[in-house]
């Protein structure tokens, strides 16, 4: 599903993959929730010549939807915190990470539908509206993950403190933060999830419009 969605995105028209990239070898070394592929690939360089064959490893995953719930009346956001194995395995001393609500886009599902579903599953809230806040590859050098970012307009006056699906091993707690608190966390480098950093910056630019 993610591959079909990628093919549907428009190219910039400057280069043709069929003419400029040669895949010499492709080996799938691991397949579970994600897959890890090992490839030998050759591509045309900026001077017009074909470069050498290089070996690369790629983490294959699907599309993700990330949504920052925001209450424009209370001027408050909702963040979720959960244990992250990636942070733990790199010896980060604080592997419980504050994030925006996020999840993979299921086959046959739109990113908007995924954002609304994840808001219910992870935070127990329903979104009144979605504000598109960009879309991009999360780590172009190593991963195929393509992230759709949203700010979700909602009522945060009464929200659950915990969430997540037990069958997915999720143990999530929620906490509300004022906009000023979010900006302090951003400026003091307390936000360590890149999609949340992007969404916090987007909200800072569009907050006045959302509060009218």
Image (cartoon, rainbow, N blue to C red):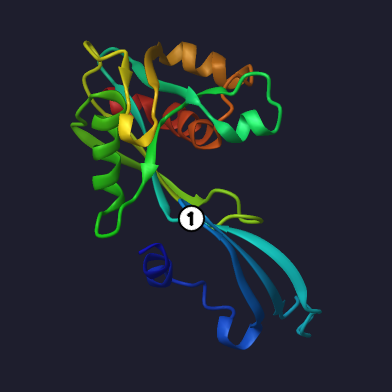
Residue 37 shows in the view: yes
Furthest-bottom residue in view? 19
On screen, residue 158 above or below 8: above
Residue 172 occupies quadrant: top left
Q: Quadrant of the N terminus?
A: bottom left
Residue occupying the point 26% across, 14% down: 160
Q: Is residue 8 left or right of residue 29?
A: left
Taking depth in this image into account, of 93 and 99 the one nearest to the observer is 93
Number of numbered markers: 1
On screen, residue 125 above or below 14: above
Q: Position of residue 70 (x, y in %)?
A: 32, 24
Residue 16 shows in the view: no
Residue occupying the point 62% across, 60% down: 58
Q: Position of residue 15 (x, y in %)?
A: 59, 80
Q: Is residue 179 left or right of residue 163?
A: right
Residue occupying the point 45% across, 51% down: 33
Q: Position of residue 48 (x, y in %)?
A: 76, 84
**Residue corresponding to mark 1:** 61
Taking depth in this image into account, of 48 and 158 the one nearest to the observer is 158
Taking depth in this image into account, of 12 and 115 the one nearest to the observer is 115
On screen, residue 204 above or below 30: above
Q: Position of residue 113 (x, y in %)?
A: 24, 46
Element under label 1?
Answer: loop
């Amino acid at each position: 599903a993610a591959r079909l969605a990628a093919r549907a995105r428009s190219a910039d028209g400057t280069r043709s993959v069929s003419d400029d990239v040669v895949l010499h070898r492709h080996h799938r070394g691991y397949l579970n929730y994600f897959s890890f592929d090992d490839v030998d690939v050759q591509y045309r360089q900026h001077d017009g010549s074909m470069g050498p064959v290089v070996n690369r490893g790629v983490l294959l995953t699907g599309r993700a939807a990330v949504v920052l719930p925001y209450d424009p009346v209370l001027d408050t956001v909702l963040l979720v915190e959960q244990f992250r194995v990636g942070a733990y395995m790199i010896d980060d001393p604080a592997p419980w990470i504050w994030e925006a609500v996020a999840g993979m886009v299921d086959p046959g599902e739109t990113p908007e539908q995924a954002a609304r579903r994840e808001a219910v599953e992870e935070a127990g809230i329903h979104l009144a509206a979605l504000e598109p806040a960009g879309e991009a590859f999360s780590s172009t050098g190593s991963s195929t993950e393509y992230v759709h970012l949203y700010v979700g307009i909602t009522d945060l006056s009464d929200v659950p403190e915990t969430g997540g699906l037990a069958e997915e091993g999720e143990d999530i707690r929620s906490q509300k933060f004022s906009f000023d608190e979010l900006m302090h966390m951003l400026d003091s480098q307390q936000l360590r999830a890149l999609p949340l950093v992007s969404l916090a910056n987007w909200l800072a630019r569009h907050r006045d419009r959302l509060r009218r």
